[in-house]
Amino acid sequence: MNIKLLGVPMDLGAGRRGVDMGPSAIRIAGVKEKLEALGHHVVDEGDILIKPPELLKIKNQKLKYLPEIVRRCTALGMKVERILEGKEFPLILGGDHSLAIGTIAGIASFCRKQKKKLGVLWIDAHGDMNTDETSPSGNIHGMPLAVSMGFGSGALTKLLGDFPKVSPQKVVLVGIRELDEGEKTLIKKHRVNTFTMEEVDKMGIGEVMKRALKKLEHVDYLHVSFDLDSLDPHLAPGVGTPVKGGLDYREAHFIMETLFDAKKMTSLEVVEVNPILDKYNQSAELAVELIQSGMGKKIL
């Protein structure tokens, strides 16, 4: 596989500093070299340049750092679209989860021109389906999935085109265990496919992934958005919004191994790695292990 690696050192969407160093931490953990050892051809495209919050002002408390996030997500989306046009695999390293607005916009723009169907598998502790009307914090990293489905601020939903980037019926969430009231309402109203940790406990991760991929079997392009806070904090302490009771080590690897076996994943982003909160780069190293599993590494 020809993989294009792209870092997005974004921390404007988050409430805590440090996640802008996530791409560097994942690179230090050897992501390029370890993917090449699996036989892939990897080109590191470097990072999207992003202004730090010290150089910016918050103009809207409900949409913090909106102008810069729009600018940089637009640049990201255009790069992702070009990568897909070159028949290559975009691997995006974050950075806070607001960057998914740009990633998904780029993929959706490509799919729209090619008349292809897009699906999104969202692996996260959180729904990230707030809008500026429902967000308790105004942090945009809690909004990208809502934005991608066409809900929220027009400045974000119209990125790379005024159309919903993905249908709610073509979105599947896995590992969810903390939702705000506005997110619960949106999930129920639009019947977004959601597998909480309760369902992982009841059914097992094997059955959850079987059902998740069944929901996505008719999409042509499948984007996987993996937030490291989907894992239990003792495994991935270096995340900005940890929540107890997450995926365990084997469950997380099983998800990625299943995606490789299904041959459905066409793009991947790994986000919310925060080295300031980490222990000896533990979370970034785990991120690389999971990427390897998604790209074909097997136990035997």
Image (cartoon, grey):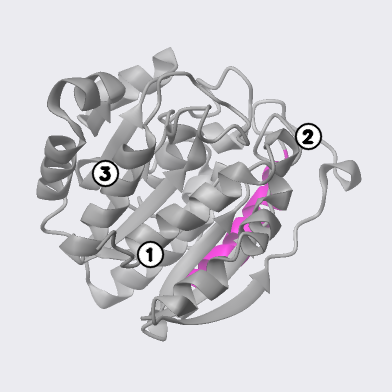
Residue visible at 54% across and 47% down in the picture: 156
* Residue 185 x/y as whole percent: 32, 18
Quadrant into which the N terminus falls: bottom left
Q: Residues within 10 Å of mark 3 (few under 14, many from 20)?
A: many
Q: Main secondary structure of the magenta part?
A: helix
**As drawn, is 52 to the left or to the right of 176?**
right
Q: Give the CA separation, mark 2 to mark 1.
A: 33 Å
Pair 3/1: label in front = 1
Residue 215, quarter of the rendered image:
top left
Residue 207 to residue 296: above or below: above
* Residue 12 x/y as whole percent: 71, 42
> Who comes first in sequence, dot 3 or dot 2?
2
Q: Give the CA separation, mark 3 to mark 2.
A: 32 Å
Magenta highlight range: 65-81
* Residue 282 x/y as whole percent: 60, 43
Which residue lies most toward the front here?
300
* Residue 67 x/y as whole percent: 71, 48
Q: Identify the element where label 3 is drawn.
A: strand
- Please give the residue where the numbered disc 2 appears in the rendered image: 59
Residue visible at 50% across and 70% down in the picture: 34
Residue 267, numbered circle: 1
Residue 49 visible: yes
Pair 2/1: label in front = 1
Which residue lies most toward the top here?
181
Q: Is residue 79 magenta?
A: yes
Residue 171, numbered circle: 3
Residue visible at 40% across and 77% down in the picture: 84
Towards the viewer: 213 or 201? 201
